[in-house]
């Protein structure tokens, strides 16, 4: 059934570590950029606590433009920027820059959706009690939307795993690169199947963890 029966056991753990390394750093940096951006998208929209229509439109348009570019094209388009920033555009480190550019606007939109689910009546009540904008953002919006924020970040992490697999095609390392080199170029079907199984298990574990954390936050 499988041609190329040597499963190359020694390659899977390093490839998994590379994937987790890329996803870990990308989600960390993307969250640092994406959450404040998502908050700004909400509070500056018309009718909200810090209404700035022009800023909102410009920011929203820029995010839409970046998100319109397919990740594989973004990888190539950012090569000069990535090389200027970290000195290389290949390997695991070279993939992190485009991954952050890819995921930060994505997180911002997910955050925006999560924050908009907060009851406007609750925000108005806090405003009536004299709460500052900062208090409304941290004590109302972010606190009330924690379960949705966790689920949004879970979706972003899973999306990043998908993106790292694409980055592997151009030599970024990780499970995607392993599947491409052995599963496609050498047509070793067993390697491809095992790599897909590892990715499926990884996604299932992350989704389960995200669901449980969100459920526990709803009980607080």
Image: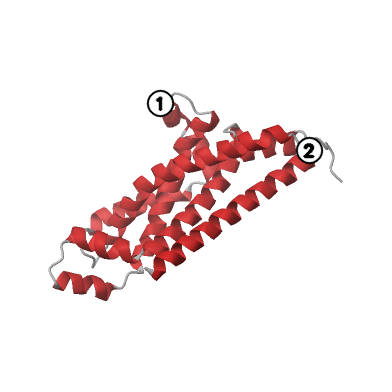
The residue at 46%/66% (across/down) is 215
Q: Quadrant of the C terminus?
A: bottom left
What residue did someone put label 1 on?
Answer: 84
The residue at 40%/57% (across/down) is 109
The residue at 33%/66% (across/down) is 144
The residue at 56%/40% (across/down) is 19
User: Is residue 133 visible from the viewing direction of this image?
Assistant: yes
Q: Compared with residue 93, is residue 102 higher up or lower down, i.e. above or below?
A: below
21 and 112: which one is in front? 21
109 and 189: which one is in front? 189
Report x, y in % for residue 149: 40, 60
Most extreme residue toward the right, as rendered?
1
**In the displayed structure, does residue 203 sit left or right of residue 66?**
right
Report x, y in % for residue 118: 32, 69
Report x, y in % for residue 148: 41, 64
As helix, strand or loop, the secondary structure at mark 1 comes to helix
208 and 110: which one is in front? 208
For disc 1, the neighbor class at 10 Å (few under 14, some 14 to 19, many from 20) is few
Rendering quarter of residue 84: top left
As helix, strand or loop, the secondary structure at mark 2 comes to loop
Disc 2 to disc 1, C-alpha distance = 37 Å
**In the displayed structure, does residue 183 sit left or right of residue 91?**
right
Q: Compared with residue 100, is residue 136 higher up or lower down, i.e. above or below?
A: below
What residue did someone put label 2 on?
Answer: 188
Most extreme residue toward the top, as rendered?
87
49 and 155: which one is in front? 155
User: Is residue 169 visible from the viewing direction of this image?
Assistant: no
Question: Disc number at residue 73?
Answer: none
- Judging from the image, the colouring scheme is secondary structure
């Amino acid at each position: 059934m499988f041609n190329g029966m040597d499963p190359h056991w020694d390659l899977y753990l390093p490839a998994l570590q590379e994937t987790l390394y890329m996803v870990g750093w990308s989600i960390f940096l993307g969250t640092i950029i994406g959450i404040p951006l998502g908050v700004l998208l909400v509070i500056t929209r018309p009718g909200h606590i810090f209404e700035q229509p022009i800023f909102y439109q410009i920011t929203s348009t820029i995010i839409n433009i970046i998100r319109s570019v397919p990740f594989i094209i973004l990888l190539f388009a950012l090569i000069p920027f990535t090389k200027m920033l970290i000195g290389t555009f290949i390997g695991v480190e070279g993939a992190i820059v485009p991954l952050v550019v890819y995921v930060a606007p994505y997180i911002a939109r997910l955050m925006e959706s999560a924050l908009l689910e907060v009851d406007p009546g609750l925000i108005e009540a806090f405003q009536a009690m004299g709460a500052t904008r900062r208090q409304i953002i941290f004590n109302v919006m972010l606190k009330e939307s924690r379960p949705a924020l966790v689920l949004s970040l879970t979706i972003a992490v899973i999306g990043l795993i998908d993106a790292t697999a694409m980055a592997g095609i151009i030599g970024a390392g990780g499970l995607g690169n392993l599947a491409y080199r052995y599963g496609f170029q050498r047509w070793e079907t067993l390697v491809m199947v095992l790599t897909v199984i590892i990715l499926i298990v990884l996604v299932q574990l992350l989704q389960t963890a995200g669901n449980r954390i969100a459920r526990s936050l709803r009980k607080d």
